[in-house]
Image: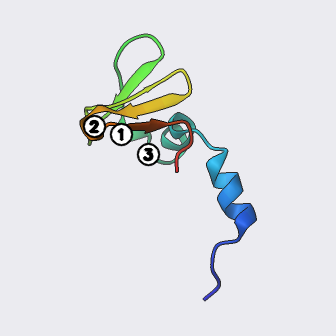
Amino acid sequence: MPGVSREQIERARQIDLLSYLETHEPQELKPDGPGRYTTASHDSLIISNGMWAWNSRSIGGRSAL
């Protein structure tokens, strides 16, 4: 079974979390204000301005990875 190439990993790092969820799991997105979203599964995960912050875990970032 082949592994994941570096190119595939780099492409995945270019996808922001909002774009990923809009495409693959739109039912997860819950509007939480203008340009701001949370998710059905994790209400402490906030997505806004191309960034995300998971407040209950004290982590955040830009990419979907």
State the residue at coordinates (75%, 62%): 7
Residue 2 lies, in percent from the top left, at 65, 84
Give the quarter of the image for residue 20. Answer: top right
Q: Badges 1 and 3: C-beta atoms under 8 Å apart?
A: yes
Does residue 13 sit above or below 43 in this rendering?
below
Q: Which kind of residue does numbered mark 2 sit on?
A: Ala
Q: Does residue 64 sit above or below 36 in this rendering?
A: below
Q: How far is disc 2 from disc 3 in space, using C-alphas?
A: 10 Å
What residue lies at 51% left-to-right and 39% top-to-bottom?
17
Query: Pointer 2: residues within 10 angstroms few (<14), some, or many (20+)?
Result: few
Q: For the residue marked with disc 3, what is the amino acid?
A: Glu
**Image quarter (top left, top right, bottom left or bottom right) of the N terminus:** bottom right
Which amino acid type is marked by label 1? Glu
Q: Which label's residue is closer to the chain start, 2 or 3? A: 3
Judge left or right: residue 43 versus residue 37: left
- Judged left or right of residue 40, residue 12 is right
Q: How far apart in space, not on screen, are marks 1 and 3 (Cα)?
A: 6 Å
Secondary structure state at the residue bearing disc 3 = loop
**Would you call the spot at circle 3 few (<14 residues within 10 Å), some (14-19), or many (20 or more)?**
few
Residue at point 29%, 32% (across, down): 55
Q: Are marks 2 and 3 in contact (CB under 8 Å)?
A: no
Which of marks 2 and 1 precedes in the sequence?
A: 1
Relative placement, left or right, of 50 versus 4 is: left
Check contact, mark 1 vs mark 2: CB within 8 A.
yes
Q: Pointer 2: what residue?
A: 40
In the picture, the disc for residue 28 is 1
Residue 25 badge: 3
Q: Secondary structure at mark 1?
A: helix
